[in-house]
Image (cartoon, rainbow, N blue to C red):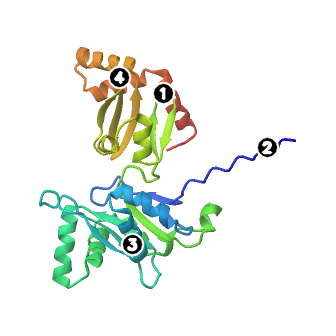
């Protein structure tokens, strides 16, 4: 008899958060998404994703998530263009580990505060960061486990115990998944910039620019479009035929290319069907 080999199980994807509270509608710089985890931290996975998200060297990120501290972004052309990334770890292990970023203005404020009060830079950065947060979130941070009622939480979340860490994220994908409407109506999910770039046959630099700044990118006669709405990007890829239709609308109606592409998409039943299914299923 032939022995049939059992297919190896695919490795389960890393789950970094199981508690997510969205405060992104608040005015900057307090517009964050509080992403927390009750289960034990997957340090390699956590570090890998944060390293990619914030352009911090992986080894440095592992050290920050292990020991705490700050990473000040290097100067570009002799000028500071970004602030810092910080990871705060409570020595008494009472409060969960917390990570966040400061923009350039907040970084300057943190440096001034550190000098004025003889504080360590991580402590000053934490004070500056928390001072900008919405009052509701500030109040929750004073409570254990963000004040969550564990009796009402999903059992899979609650059984993990106390919150182990909170990442205050401002990037466009708190779940680290990028959804793109494809020309055939599929809603394809990718996990990182590299995977996103590979899907569309573009470079990582092109992918990063597109998802951070929005706009369009021609790819083999087709067009990849990203529109930033309320700080969150919506990505779609159009066939050369639909791209041609959009350019006709630009000429005929004087529309911006993004508006023309949106009109084409809404009138294309194939592209819209995945979004309709997503809405009916209550997906985000």
Question: What is the x, y in percent for residue 67?
Answer: 40, 77
- Alpha carbons under labels 4 and 2: distance apart: 45 Å
Q: Earlier in the sequence, mark 2 or mark 1?
A: 2
Residue 33 seen in the current view: no
Q: Nearer the viewer, mark 2 or mark 1?
A: 2
* Label 4 element class: loop
Please state which of residues 33 and 238 is positioned toward the viewer in this rendering: 238
Are dots 4 and 1 in contact, CB under 8 Å?
A: no
Lower sequence index among marks 3 and 2: 2
Which residue lies under the disc numbered 4?
A: 221
The answer to which of marks 3 and 4 sits earlier in the sequence is: 3
Circles 4 and 2: CB atoms closer than 8 Å: no
Decide: few, some or many residues near mark 3? Use Cα within 10 Å; few <14, some 14-19, many ≥20.
Answer: few
Instruction: Using the numbered discs, state the Cα–Cα distance from disc 1 to disc 3 in whole angstroms.
Output: 45 Å
Secondary structure under badge 1?
helix
Give the quarter of the image for residue 109. Answer: bottom left
Position in image of residue 152 (x %, y %): 61, 63
Which residue is denoted by mark 2 in the rendering? Answer: 4
Mark 4–mark 1 Cα distance, whole angstroms, equals 21 Å
């Amino acid at each position: 008899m032939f022995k049939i080999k059992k297919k190896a199980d695919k490795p389960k994807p890393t789950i970094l958060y199981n508690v997510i509270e969205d405060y992104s509608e608040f005015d900057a710089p307090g517009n964050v998404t509080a992403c927390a985890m009750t289960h034990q931290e997957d340090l390699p996975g956590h570090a890998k994703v944060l390293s990619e998200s914030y352009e911090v060297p992986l080894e440095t990120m592992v050290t920050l998530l292990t020991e705490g501290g700050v990473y000040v972004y290097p100067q570009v052309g002799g000028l500071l263009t970004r602030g810092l990334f910080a990871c705060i770890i409570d020595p008494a292990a009472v409060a969960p580990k917390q990570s966040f970023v400061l923009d350039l203005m907040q970084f300057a404020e943190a440096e001034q505060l550190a000098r004025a009060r003889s504080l360590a830079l991580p402590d000053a950065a934490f004070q500056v960061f928390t001072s900008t947060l919405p009052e509701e979130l500030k109040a929750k941070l004073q409570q254990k486990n963000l004040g969550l009622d564990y009796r009402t939480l999903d059992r899979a979340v609650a059984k993990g115990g106390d919150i182990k860490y909170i990442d205050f994220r401002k990037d466009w994908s708190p779940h680290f998944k990028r959804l793109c409407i494809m020309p055939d109506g599929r809603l394809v999910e990718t996990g990182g910039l590299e995977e996103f770039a590979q899907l569309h046959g573009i470079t990582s630099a092109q992918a990063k620019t597109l998802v951070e700044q929005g706009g369009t990118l021609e790819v083999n006669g087709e067009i990849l479009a990203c529109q930033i709405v309320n700080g969150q990007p919506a990505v779609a890829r159009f066939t050369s035929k639909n791209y041609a239709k959009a350019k006709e609308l630009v000429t005929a109606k004087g529309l911006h290319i993004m508006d023309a592409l949106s009109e084409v998409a809404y009138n294309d039943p194939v592209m819209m069907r995945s979004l309709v299914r997503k809405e009916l299923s209550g997906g985000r």
